[in-house]
Image (cartoon, grey):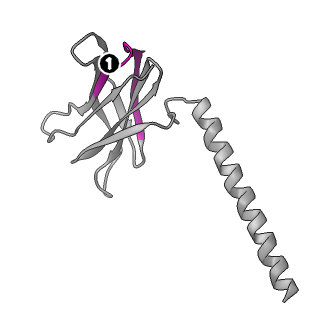
Amino acid sequence: MNRLLAILATSAVLTAAGATGAAAQGTASAADASPSSPAPGVCVTGYRGVVVNEVCAVVSGDQVTFYGQTTPGSIGWTARTVPYRMTASVVGGATLGTITPTVLVDRSSTPVGRISGTVPCGSSATATLETTQWGWPPATATITVQAGC
């Protein structure tokens, strides 16, 4: 009986250590945010068509970063290049940027790009990510966030 309790206690300690390690790794990747591993944020997924687009926002004071990613819409997807357009702006105000990348979309989640900028305190900013492949149905995702200085 004592042996069973010892095993359970050891298992609980190892599980807690694993959870702590995973949390620490998540924090490290957020600090090192690169296009392949963006910082955590609020995300919106668009229409599930040929591809599934997702646009996310990370807000820190008056700074906002929007990033997009895409995933194939079917299991039978063959890797190919796909054109995109991502725009971001202050609602009722200035444009933060527009990018038009052509991205090689393989079978996993693929980063599309990012736009960052400064937003006046209390204002909202919006971003849209869309596929511009001729002949495909729209796969648009739009997000709006507020800068909270």
Query: Residue at (34%, 29%) from the top-left corner?
Result: 145
Residue 41 lies, in percent from the top left, at 45, 36
Q: Residue at x 42, y 44 (%)?
A: 109
Residue nearest the viewer, comparing 38 with 64: 64
The answer to whether residue 129 is magenta is no
Task: Check if residue 126 falls in the magenta segment.
Answer: yes
Magenta span of residues:
110-127
Left/right of residue 93 with respect to residue 7 in the rendered view: left
Mark 1, Cα crowd under 10 Å, few <14 / some 14-19 / many 20+, is some
Going 66% across and 43% down the picture, which residue do you hit? 25
**Numbered disc total:** 1
Q: Does 65 sit above or below residue 81?
A: above
Q: Which residue sits furthest top?
A: 94
Of the residues shown, which amino acid type is indicated by label 1?
Answer: Ser
**Residue under label 1:** 123
Q: Is residue 11 left or right of residue 46?
A: right
Could you tell me what secondary structure mostly forms the magenta stretch?
Answer: strand
Image-quadrant location for residue 27? top right
